[in-house]
Image (spheres, grey):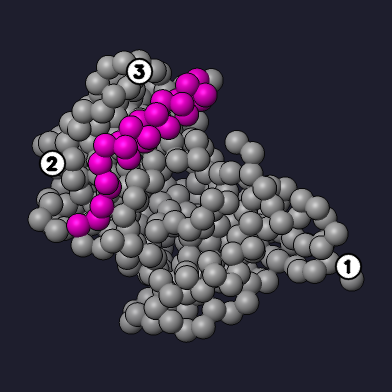
Amino acid sequence: MRWKEMFSTIDAHVGGQPLRLITFGVPNLKPAPLREQIAEMESKHDHIRGWLLAEPRGHAGMTGALLVPSLLPDIDYGVIFMSSGGYKPMSGHGMIALATTLIDSGTVSIDGPDTRITFETMAGVIQARASVDNGRVRGVRFRNVPSFRTHKDLEIPYEGRKVKVDIAYGANWYAIVHAEDLGIVLEADKSLRIKLAGLAIAKAVTEQIEVKHPTDPALDGLFGTVILGPPQNDENTSRNATVYLNGLIDRSPCGTGMSATMACMAEDGLLQVGQPFVSESIMLSTMTGRISTTTEVGGFPAIIPEIAGRGQITGMHQFFIDPSDPLGKGFVLL
């Protein structure tokens, strides 16, 4: 056989944003705290991330997940989230897709109509609860890590004027800005304009401040820009386009971006505990959030958000690595 390596995956999506769960081919990582396992993956096996998530087998928007044993009590799985660009502390759509995939593939047994799976991520412990009907997952909600805002109405330069931006954490860090202030509309056919605006905001923020987690330096650093606008469907609360630092626009409403947005709304008195928050993406897919309870992180008021959505399995794949393929190691074009 001429192939150097072989890998198996199960692919799924939530609201149009994909997840690729790697089920075979990655060497076993030694039992260790999750962050050490991530470091081992990055130092010894990072080529696999490029093989499976970058082109020609993946693309710039592909999120990957690798399940590993956790040393923490009462945890079902540790999970390493990654992309063609690197490693992620957490992925909201990935969490929904992962729980859906594990149950619908038969990996996790159905435990009644409300099946729970607890994960350890780099950002913290996440509990997912799947609503199961007639043997299939109909939706997943997960309780995210504490989410909070560190900067309100930060004024940054944008196209010769100043715009106000909030900086908030929802398991990843986001600059949050309104489309109206940027002079753009959140429509799929305006994706290039949205991308450029999101990148400009992220660049201006990182030039002005250091985005730092108050208690965990490993979680420092801006992850992207959430641009908010009015929903097309009046039954929804708002629309968002989340632009990552590589310029990719999230096809889903972005669960971690929603968590950061909800933290801002809660502090401003616009969202109460238990009140539904329904966000739509530029693809018109939706996810629903609510505040479970309030807390604090490093002196900042914080919320515990719950995010809900529906995942769909799209395929099961086997990938081969041919050492004679000059592009086999992977590449990314945006």
Q: Main secondary structure of the magenta part?
A: helix
Residue 144 image offset from top left, x and y in percent: 30, 57
**First reached walking from the N terminus: tag 1 or tag 2:** 1
**First reached walking from the N terminus: tag 2 or tag 3:** 3
Please tell me whether mark 1 sits on a helix, a strand or a loop: loop
The residue positioned 29% from the left and 24% from the top of the image is: 157
Q: Which residue is mark 3?
A: 159
Q: Which residues are magenta?
A: 190-214
Please tell me whether mark 2 sits on a helix, a strand or a loop: helix
Q: Which mark is residue 12?
A: none
Q: Amino acid at mark 3?
A: Glu
Residue 318 image offset from top left, x and y in percent: 74, 62
The residue positioned 55% from the left and 57% from the top of the image is: 64
Q: Which mark is residue 2?
A: 1
State left or right for residue 73 relative to residue 137: left
State left or right for residue 201 relative to residue 88: left
Relative to residue 117, is residue 262 depicted above or below? above
Q: Residues within 10 Å of mark 3 (few under 14, many from 20)?
A: few
Q: Nearer the viewer, residue 51 or 255?
A: 51
Q: Which residue is mark 2?
A: 267
The residue positioned 44% from the left and 56% from the top of the image is: 88
